[in-house]
Image (cartoon, grey):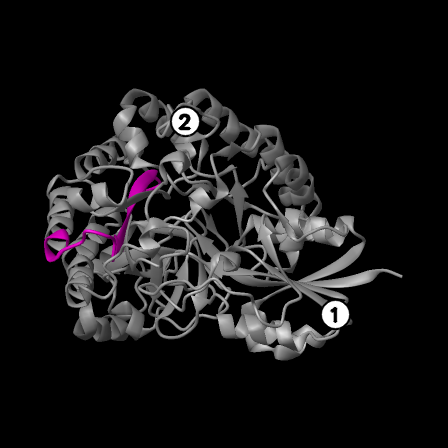
């Protein structure tokens, strides 16, 4: 008789791995492969599905429940809300009869949000906590050993292939972003890594083979995946490189990697990246430039290279063993703009994204002055940045920041820096990156209302507000007409002038509320010339339909 298993996705977010919907983490797929290898028929559900319908967890008999969860770099999420410790413990307690296991970053500890220390503890209600690689630990445990184990691609590569089909059970399928692992570990682990980061817990880098990645992509593609991110790594430029803290990029290897992904998913719609170390770019400009060019040649447009800048204060950089000084980061921004700033279909190919962390050792009020001055410097130089993330440090036991930090010491200045960034930098930068008339293909609505909010599939996609009530799951092309601090306002494209509701007509550039009423009375228009006599120039005439 076949045994039944339940995989609960509580979502994960680490410095080098995102698994919050619509992303699905490698951990989930590898665990599904392990369960299949041990003879289990596994069912997959997300924490969001359980919240919406608790009866889902009792829909069928379950012999084993495995939950993957945990955050080490908490953020703000649209597509899903990660499981809280209370929810995790409640689910563990609820499954009294079947065997239960929990794994993922939750094994490192838990805090309710940034600005608090993460407490390492046993997770109540679970028989075991899977230590290290969840899949390797689960396999060892099911084989009669201890529930622990380091990542081993000779084991996890076959599991990732065997578990690829689980993506079809994701509630957002087929609009699911498959996070692809290329490496674990940190090249700076021997010198401690950055003071706050959990990636050194995995040791020095272990690079996955191109063949292993390609086989997983082929299996995911066969299961219906069309959206991929080479995201589970601390620095993609260092892929399969060696040589100290800042390995020299190998452009030819990256070109081969992207080629292999495309060969095994020939009709993919998204191929993006995540982390790039600005220190690598600053120290190896020529090789990094060639490597970035290889990425641009192989990816899809609208991509983001996430820079772990953390601070623009040199004293804080030194105190926390960070990767790059402010001038290094600025130079890296220039190079990424030079290589990736060209537009394809109106959208920049590849732009940097900046991460700031508040609460690090050595931080003073002057740190925030330096951060603001750095952002002004970037903007005044005419450069483009896709987004700026600002968060408070969440120190974990075993990191230097756990003992030495400035949590709570500059709360007011932190809030004012965040507000300054949103109003003085983000909004004008969005105008630069997404000018009026920019068409954003295949925006997936995630929040219904007026406005409805959605995003494209991709790495740090811009939040798109549409002044129409659209059902969740609607997919539309949208044209940018206005900007907020962290989002754009867009209309469905093509813009159907003769049928668009008056409340949406007012968002056509130059129209406004009063002219929208006039336009509504004068409809229908036969062509743009007739419309222009009433509305004037709009900047989106190329996407209007009459």
Q: Quote the CA–CA distance across marks 2 and 1.
A: 49 Å
| Mark 1 crowd level (few <14, some 14–19, many ≥20, 10 Å Cα) | some
Mark 2, other Cα within 10 Å: few <14 / some 14–19 / many ≥20? many
Of badges 2 and 1, nearer the viewer stands: 1
Q: Earlier in the sequence, mark 2 or mark 1?
A: 1
Location of the N terminus (image quadrant) = bottom right
**Residue 417, position in %: x, y?**
16, 60
Report the disc number at residue 98: 1
Q: Which residues are magenta?
A: 344-367
> At which x and y percent is residue 521?
26, 75
Please give left or right for residue 339 compared with residue 92 in the image: left
Across and down, in percent, residue 346 comes to 31, 42
**Which residue sits at x=56%, y=76%?**
52
Q: In the rendered picture of this protein, how many numbered marks are placed on residues?
A: 2
Q: Going 62% across and 78% down the picture, which residue do you hit?
A: 54
Residue position marked by numbered label 2 in the rendering = 294
The location of residue 452, given as percent across then percent down, is: 39, 69
Verify whether residue 346 appears in magenta.
yes
Is 476 positioned to the left or the right of 374 in the image? right
Where disc 1 sits, the SS reads: loop
Q: Taking 108 as reference, is 386 above or below it?
A: above
Q: Do tag 2 and tag 1 residues touch (Cβ < 8 Å)? A: no
Q: Where is the C terminus found, in terms of image quarters? A: bottom left
- The numbered disc on residue 534 is none
Q: Does residue 510 show up?
A: no
**Residue 522, image quadrant:** bottom left
327 displayed left or right of 78: left
Q: Residue at x 67, y 73 (%)?
A: 57
Q: Is residue 476 left or right of residue 514?
A: right
Judge whether residue 264 is colored magenta.
no
Q: Quadrant of residue 532?
A: bottom left
Element assignment for label 2: helix
């Amino acid at each position: 008789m076949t045994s039944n298993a339940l995989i609960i996705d509580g979502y994960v977010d680490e410095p080098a791995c995102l698994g919050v919907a619509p992303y699905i983490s490698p951990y989930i797929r590898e665990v599904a492969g392990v369960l299949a290898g041990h003879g289990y028929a596994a069912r997959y559900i997300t924490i969001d599905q359980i919240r919406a319908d608790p009866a889902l967890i009792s829909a069928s008999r379950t012999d084993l429940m495995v939950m993957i969860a945990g955050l080490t770099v908490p953020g703000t999420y649209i597509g899903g809300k990660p499981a809280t410790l209370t929810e995790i413990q409640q689910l563990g307690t609820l499954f009294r009869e079947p065997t239960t296991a929990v794994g993922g970053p939750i094994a490192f500890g838990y805090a309710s949000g940034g600005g608090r220390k993460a407490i390492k503890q046993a997770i109540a209600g679970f028989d075991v906590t899977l230590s290290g690689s969840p899949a390797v630990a689960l396999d060892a445990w099911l084989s009669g050993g201890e529930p622990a184990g380091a990542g081993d691609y000779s084991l996890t590569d076959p599991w990732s292939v065997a578990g690829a089909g689980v993506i079809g059970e994701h509630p957002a399928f087929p609009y699911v972003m498959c996070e692809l692992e290329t490496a674990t570990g940190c090249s700076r682990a021997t010198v401690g890594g950055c003071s706050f980061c959990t990636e050194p817990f995995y040791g020095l880098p272990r690079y996955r083979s191109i063949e292993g990645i390609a086989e997983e992509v082929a299996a995911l593609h066969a299961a219906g995946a069309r959206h991929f991110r080479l995201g589970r790594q601390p620095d993609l430029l260092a892929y399969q490189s060696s040589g100290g803290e800042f390995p020299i990029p190998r452009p030819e290897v990256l070109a081969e990697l992207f080629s292999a992904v495309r060969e095994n998913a020939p009709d993919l719609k998204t191929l993006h990246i995540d982390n790039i170390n600005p220190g690598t770019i600053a120290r190896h400009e020529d090789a990094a430039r060639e490597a970035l060019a290889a990425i641009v040649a192989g990816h899809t447009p609208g991509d983001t290279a996430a820079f772990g800048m953390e601070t623009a204060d040199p004293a804080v950089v030194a105190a926390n063993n960070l990767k790059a000084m402010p001038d290094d980061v600025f130079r890296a921004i220039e190079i990424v703009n030079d290589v990736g700033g060209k537009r394809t279909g109106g959208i920049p190919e590849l732009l940097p994204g900046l991460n700031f962390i508040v609460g690090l050792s050595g931080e003073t009020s002057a740190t925030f002055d330096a951060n603001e001055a750095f952002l002004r410097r970037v903007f005044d130089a005419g450069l483009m940045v896709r987004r700026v993330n600002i968060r408070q440090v969440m120190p974990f036991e075993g990191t230097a920041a756990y003992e030495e930090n400035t949590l709570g010491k500059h709360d007011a200045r932190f809030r004012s820096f965040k507000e300054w960034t949103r109003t003085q930098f983000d909004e004008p930068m969005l105008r630069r990156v997404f000018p009026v008339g920019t068409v954003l293909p295949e925006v997936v609505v995630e929040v219904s209302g007026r406005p409805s909010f959605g995003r494209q599939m991709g790495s740090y996609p811009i939040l798109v507000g549409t002044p129409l009530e659209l059902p969740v799951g609607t997919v539309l092309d949208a044209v940018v007409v206005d900007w907020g601090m962290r989002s754009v306002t867009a209309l469905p494209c093509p813009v159907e002038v003769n049928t668009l509701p008056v409340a949406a007509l007012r968002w056509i550039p130059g129209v406004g509320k009063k002219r929208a009423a006039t336009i509504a009375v004068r409809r229908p228009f036969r062509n743009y010339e007739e419309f222009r006599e009433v509305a004037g120039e709009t900047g989106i005439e190329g996407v209007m339909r009459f």
